[in-house]
């Protein structure tokens, strides 16, 4: 796992911790927060942010949703959201 991968996972969890338990974030929120520049280079982190979310799903930490319903990686098309796993 690269430093960027770790930073994105930590950023996703950190953003979720700052929000209500029922709130979700967009992968772009994590990409923007993890990016260390002030231009639109965060866009290059979008796919790595989505992959980080799926690793966190596999670890049982988060759920990825579409239209408010959990989805599997193979079903995730278009806009997705990330929220804390319901335990």
Image (cartoon, rainbow, N blue to C red):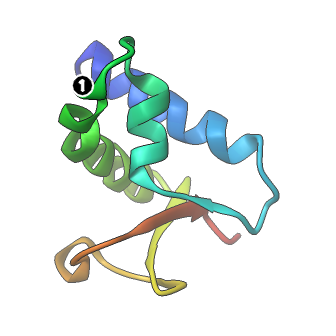
Residue 76 is situated, as x and y percent measured from the top left of the image, at 25, 76
Q: Is residue 66 above or below residue 79?
A: below
Q: Is residue 33 above or below residue 85?
A: above
Residue 75 is situated, as x and y percent measured from the top left of the image, at 22, 83
Q: Is residue 6 above or below residue 73?
A: above
Q: Residue at x 28, y 29 (%)?
A: 40
| Mark 1 closeness class: few <14, some 14–19, many ≥20 residues within 10 Å | few
Residue with the most extreme right position: 20
Q: Residue at x 38, y 57 (%)?
A: 58
Judge from the rendering whether residue 37 lies leftward or rightward of residue 67; answer left or right. left
Using the image as rendered, state which of residue 51 and residue 31 is in the foreground. 31
| Figure quadrant of the C terminus | bottom right
The answer to which image quadrant residue 22 occupies is bottom right
Judge from the rendering whether residue 66 lies leftward or rightward of residue 23; answer left or right. left
The residue indicated by pointer 1 is 41
Using the image as rendered, state which of residue 48 and residue 86 is in the foreground. 48
Q: Secondary structure at mark 1?
A: helix
Q: Residue at x 43, y 49 (%)?
A: 56
């Amino acid at each position: 796992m690269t430093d960027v991968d770790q930073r994105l996972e930590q950023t996703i969890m950190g953003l979720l911790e700052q929000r209500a338990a029922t709130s979700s974030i967009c992968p772009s929120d994590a990409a923007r927060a993890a990016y260390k520049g002030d231009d639109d280079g965060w866009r290059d982190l979008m796919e790595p942010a989505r992959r980080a979310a799926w690793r966190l799903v596999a670890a049982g930490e988060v759920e990825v949703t579409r239209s408010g319903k959990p989805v599997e990686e193979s079903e995730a098309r278009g806009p997705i959201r990330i929220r804390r796993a319901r335990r």
